[in-house]
Structure formats: C-alpha cells, structure tokens
Image (cartoon, rainbow, N blue to C red):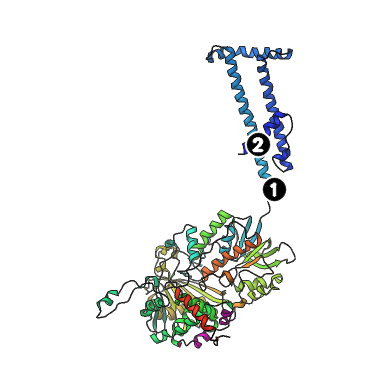
C-alpha cells in the first residue's frame, strides 16, 4: 500500500517537468526535504536511463542529425558485436525484429529499475515518517503504585493491560515484592508471613489463574475441613459444605437409613448450613447454637440497607450486638470468638459489628458452600500467584518494580493544572530518590498510610488522607514454622486454637503443611531428607506475645498448645524453627472505623490519587466479597486502576479491566431484606445508636 501511494506522485513529477509539493506526502519539513533529495537522485537515474534508450531509439528515426549519426555509429558498432548472439537467439531470422525484441526487453528492465528506485524512495520516506512520529509522540503518563499486596498488583494489572500510553512503576518496601526471591529462614528453608485461605467466592482470583495459564488444581488444595480445639478437646469441625455427607441414621424407617453417607444436597441458606453442621459440633449444645438466629436477623437488617444504617451498626462493637440479640456465652466463647480472632484478628469486643456481620454473612446467609476454603498446594502465595502475575506484567507491559523502596513522602501541587505529584522514597542502602508522576494508587494498610502522611503535609490537609492515617494501629501478627522429627496425624490439616490461657488473648491456628503440600515435601525441607511434619502456626492480636523470645514462643506451642489439641505432638521433637514478628501489619476494623477508612475513589480535591486494599470503602462500586480479604483487596486494586485511568486519560478509552461479581444473593435472602425494610418503617432500631 505504501508503494501504491508513493508511485503515482513521484512518476508524475519526473515526467511532467514540475515539482510536486512534498506537503502532499507529509506535513513535516524534515520529511519534505528528504523526499526532495530522494526524488532528485531518482530523477537523475531515470534521466540517464532515458538517454541510453534514446541512442538506441535513433536507429529507427528518419530525422537524425549529426549527433544522432555519431550515436548511431556507436550503437551500430555495439549491435554488430552482438550480431552472432542476436542471430543465435532469434526465432524470426530478422535482425530488425530481433533488435525490436531486445529493445522491449531493455524497456522492461528499465521499468523494473525505476520501480526499484521508487521502492527505495518509499522505504526511506517510511523510515523518516516513523522516526518523525516517534519524535512527535506525546510523552507517556507516569503512574506509581505504592504497595505490593493484592491491591497493588490488581491496580498494576488493570493499568498495564489497558495498553494506554502509560509508564507504570510499583514500589514496595519488601526487597522483592514480585515473589521471585523466596523468603527463607536462617537455615535456608522457605517460610511465609501468615497462612491465607482462598474461599469459594473468589471469582476474580480464580479467573486470574486462567489468564496466567495456571491450573487451579496445581495451585490450590481441595477444599478442606477445619477443626476447633479448646482445652476440653475438639469443639467443632467446619465442614466442606459442597462435599458434606449425611451422617449415619439409625432408624426403623428403611428410607432414612439409605440416606446415610449420601452427598448432602445444596439447600437454601441458612437451612443448608444448619443441617450440614448439625453433627459436627462435638460439645456445643443445640440450644446454644440456636441462639445465633437473632444475629441472622440483625445481619439481614444491616447488610440489606444503605450506608446510613450500616454506619449505625459500625459504631457498635460485635460483643454489644451479641448481647442485645441474645447469643449464648458458650457459643460466643467457644466458637464465634475463635473464628473472629483468626478471621478478623480481634475479639468481638474490639471489632465493629458491621465488619463482623459481613464475615458471618458468608458463613450463614450467602450460599451453603460460600465458606468452603482451600489453601496453597505448593510453595507460598507469593511464588504460586504473585510471581507469574508480576512476570506477565513485566515481560509483556514493561512494568517497573522497585523493591526495597520505602515511600516516605508524597507532594501534591493542587494549583497546577496537571495535578502532578512527586514521590520521595528511600532504598535500603539509604539513598533518597524522587519521581514525578501523573497519578498514584495507594495500596497501603493503615500503618503504612500513617507513616507516609506524617511527612506529606500536601495530602494530610485533606480529611480523606488524615482520617486514613488515624488507622495506624493495626493487628500484631506472629508467624511460626516448625519442622518435627516425626509425622503427627491430625483430624484435619487446618486447625484453630480456642480459649487456651496460653494464647494470652490472641487467636491461634496451626496448619499441617506436610499434608497440604505432600507433593512438595522436599521443598518444605529445602532439599533435605524430610523427617516429619512441618507446621505453620500463626498468632493474631498477638501483642501479649510479641515481647517473648523466639524460643519461648516455640515452647508455648510445643509444650502447651499443640499437645493439648492433639496428644501425639507430645512425642515429637523440634528439628528446626523460624519465628517472624509483624507488629501492626494487618488491618484492624474497630467500632467507628467505617468513616475513617479511605474511599477507593479518593478525595475529590485530589482526583489523581486513588486507594486500594481490603480496608477501603468502595461506595457504589462495592464488590460482593465483603469480609473476604484477598479477593476484595485484589478487586479494589483493579477498580482503583480503572478509575485512575478514567481520571487521567478519559472514560472513552477502549479497554477497562472487567470485574466479576460474586454469586447473586439467594431469593430467600432478598425476600428477607424486602420484608425487613417494611418492618423497619414501623419499628425503630432501638438497638443501634
């Protein structure tokens, strides 16, 4: 197509005697000059060819002058020298006709030569135009993402895959937030801060696996049961609702006996959950479990209404709500409190009632199998999911990742028409650098936000940022990895400690990694010959344990907690240990915190800075994964990336990263919400402030 465009114009200029204006080819002065030079060179070559042809053509002219005669003699001499060849190749026996054929051949070669000249000119023109376009191309927008958790990586994916003229940089304090560098103990064994589950309703993370070409069966375990242990023994087992079976029934009625061991049908919530868990509570009496019905009514009222009603529930503690709605003390202490300590990382008296009901909604009211959970099958979350995602973005979209970068200050010029920001960050070697950017996604927790805002007066003057910085008091976490000299069988691979004095007010879990990662056991031992079980133990709300030494924490586990839950642990010896302490590292949703949590859309006065993470408020873009931290954080990052590009590039851009919704609420929940709204028109909410 380029040749078809260039050829007629050039040929017209060469044969008509006038010079075609270079503006017809390009609006660039540089390109015009270069085209003229190429045209002149081409014209010289073509003119020389015409001169040669005119000498031969004079043989057939009746009006040749002396010059033509001299040329004719030269041409005749040349012809005579080739006469033998001409005669040998002639099929007519006529030298004149053979010469005519030769002239046609030369004419064809001349046209081919001219065609080559024009192609050369066109290639040169094309290169010049491309170079000029690159010179005139607008500089790319620069966007920084601060924080390398699920929120940060979700934002990076949404912005990079939009394929706009944008340069994206992700900064994180971790030396390598991409997952390429494993986190190792002093002895070289792989470790991880916290053990994270993946619930059934994680549609966007599941889709991410497909997009990266990952088979979910290679990444995740099967959905697993979880056991709850107290000093009295096994209290309850959380089932895999999608795989539950009907317990053995001893009945004189043959039909009922045949149901024993059959797969439990998917029933409407909360009926399905109640029936599926009925045989799994070992010690909590039925009347205590039945006291939870009042809480379900409150959950419908809270989550089925608008933000105004939800903020009223947010000002209450979960403990206050439990008392008002008549939950039994036994149910709270032995089941709900341990669940909250490992799910929201604080006891009910310190948690917002709103956030607690968002979590319990999935356990009791969403779908029968919504609370089914699975775990990483090999390695860690970082090397199983984050690494392939980061590799994809770096290799295909030129994402720049700056690990070991502590962002300490963000400047913002609200008087500038472009709303530019400047980020100051310090590397681990102490070097301080700055980068000017057009947009920012802050994917930090409350502690990180507080640290940045302390040195960022340009942003701290706005209430959105100052309120977010006030949530600096995160949850303290301790992670422990223990390698044993023998294998200890357990009822389930995932387990929860409940009501043990040795916990000192914290929540505790232990996971049998040798059971989760049986196919990866040698990697758990860093290539050493496996000797026994490998445990990942986590403490949340662990402030009372932080001051203890690593040895003391390990001793509490091996002497007090683990043998009380599973007696066989008393016979095992420790081969190796690792203890990691992470003060204030997890988001804390205290009563009244809803208003202080930053909106994902940012502050209206600072349109080019957005927020991402499991703690942000999503407003009218709220995703259904409330209480499910990894999915919600990832989705908030995608949404934040989308709206930042809307702000900086425009809403008419071609591609916006899609977000998959969770499953729609069941019909009976919708009906309960509708009924509740009608009742609340007549009945005041006397239980909220």
Across and down, in percent, residue 137 comes to 68, 50
Asked whether, in this view, residue 3 is left or right of residue 286, the answer is right
Above/below status of 351 relative to 369: below
Identify the residue at image location x=67%, y=31%. 11
The CA span between labels 1 and 2 is: 23 Å
Q: Nearer the viewer, residue 266 or 599?
A: 266
List the residue tagged with mark 2: 6
Q: Decide: few, some or many residues near mark 2? Use Cα within 10 Å; few <14, some 14-19, many ≥20.
A: some
- Which residues make up the magenta segment? 308-328
Q: Which comes before the other along the chain, label 1 or label 2?
A: 2
Q: Nearer the viewer, residue 665 or 284?
A: 665
The image quadrant where one finds the N terminus is: top right
Magenta span includes 580: no
The image quadrant where one finds the C terminus is: bottom right
Q: Secondary structure at mark 2?
A: helix
Magenta span includes 324: yes
Q: Is residue 541 visible?
A: no
Q: Decide: few, some or many residues near mark 1? Use Cα within 10 Å; few <14, some 14-19, many ≥20.
A: few
Which disc number belongs to residue 135? 1
Identify the image quadrant of residue 32.
top right
């Amino acid at each position: 197509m380029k040749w078809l465009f260039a050829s007629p114009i050039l040929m017209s200029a060469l044969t008509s005697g006038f010079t075609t204006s270079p503006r017809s080819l390009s609006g660039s002065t540089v390109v015009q000059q270069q085209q003229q030079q190429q045209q002149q060179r081409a014209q010289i070559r073509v003119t020389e060819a015409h001169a040669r042809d005119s000498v031969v053509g004079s043989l057939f002219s009746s009006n040749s002058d002396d010059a033509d005669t001299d040329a004719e003699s030269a041409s005749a001499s040349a012809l005579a020298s080739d006469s033998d060849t001409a005669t040998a190749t002639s099929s007519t026996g006529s030298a004149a006709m053979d010469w005519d054929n030769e002239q046609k051949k030369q004419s064809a070669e001349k046209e081919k030569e001219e065609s080559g000249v024009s192609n050369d000119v066109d290639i040169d023109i094309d290169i010049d135009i491309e170079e000029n376009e690159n010179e005139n191309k607008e500089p790319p927008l620069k966007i920084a993402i601060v924080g390398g958790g699920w929120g940060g990586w979700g934002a990076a994916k949404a912005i990079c895959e939009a394929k706009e003229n944008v340069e994206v940089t992700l900064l994180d304090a971790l030396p390598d937030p991409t997952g390429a560098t494993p986190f190792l103990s002093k002895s070289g064994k792989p470790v991880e801060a916290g053990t994270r589950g993946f619930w059934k309703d994680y549609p966007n993370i599941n889709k991410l696996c497909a997009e990266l070409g990952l088979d979910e069966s290679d990444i995740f375990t099967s959905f697993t049961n979880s056991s709850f242990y107290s000093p009295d023994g096994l209290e309850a087992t959380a089932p895999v609702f999608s795989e539950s079976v009907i317990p053995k029934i001893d009945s004189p009625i043959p039909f009922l006996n045949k149901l024993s061991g059959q797969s439990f049908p998917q029933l409407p919530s909360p009926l399905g959950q109640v029936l599926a868990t009925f045989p799994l509570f070992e010690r909590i009496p039925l009347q205590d479990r039945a006291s939870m019905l009042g809480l379900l009514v409150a959950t419908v009222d809270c989550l089925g209404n608008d933000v105004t009603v939800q903020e009223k529930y947010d000002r209450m503690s979960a403990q206050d709500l439990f008392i008002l709605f008549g939950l039994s003390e036994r149910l709270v202490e032995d089941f709900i409190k341990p669940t909250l300590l490992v799910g929201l990382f604080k006891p009910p008296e310190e948690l917002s009632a709103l956030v607690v009901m968002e979590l319990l909604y999935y356990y009791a009211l969403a779908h029968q199998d919504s609370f089914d959970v699975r775990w990483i099958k090999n390695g860690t979350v970082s090397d199983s999911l984050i690494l392939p995602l980061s590799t994809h973005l770096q290799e295909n979209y030129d994402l720049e990742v700056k690990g070991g970068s502590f962002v300490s200050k963000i400047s913002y010029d609200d008087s500038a028409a472009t709303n530019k920001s400047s980020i100051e960050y310090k590397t681990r070697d102490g070097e301080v650098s700055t980068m000017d950017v057009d947009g920012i996604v802050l994917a930090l927790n409350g502690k990180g936000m507080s640290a940045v805002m302390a040195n960022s007066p340009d942003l701290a003057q706005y209430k959105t940022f100052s309120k977010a910085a006030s949530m600096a008091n995160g949850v303290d976490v301790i992670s422990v990895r223990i390698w044993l000299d023998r294998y200890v069988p357990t009822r389930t691979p995932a387990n929860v400690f409940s009501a043990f004095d040795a916990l000192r007010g914290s929540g505790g879990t232990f996971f049998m990694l040798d059971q989760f990662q049986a196919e990866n056991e040698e990697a758990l031992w860093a290539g050493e010959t496996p000797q026994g079980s490998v445990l990942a133990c986590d403490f949340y709300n662990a402030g009372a344990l932080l001051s203890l030494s690593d040895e003391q924490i390990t001793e509490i586990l091996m002497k007090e907690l683990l043998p009380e839950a599973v007696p066989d642990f008393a016979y095992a010896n420790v081969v190796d240990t690792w203890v990691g302490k992470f003060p204030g590292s997890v988001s804390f949703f205290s009563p009244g915190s809803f208003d202080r949590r930053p909106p994902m859309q940012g502050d209206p006065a600072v349109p080019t800075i957005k927020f991402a993470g499991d703690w942000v408020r999503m407003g009218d873009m709220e995703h259904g994964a409330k209480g499910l931290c990894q999915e919600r954080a990832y989705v908030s990052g995608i949404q934040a990336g989308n709206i930042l590009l809307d702000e900086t590039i425009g809403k008419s851009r071609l591609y916006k990263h899609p977000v998959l919704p969770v499953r729609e609420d069941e019909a009976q929940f919708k009906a309960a919400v509708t009924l509740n709204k009608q009742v609340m028109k007549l009945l005041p909410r006397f239980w909220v402030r």
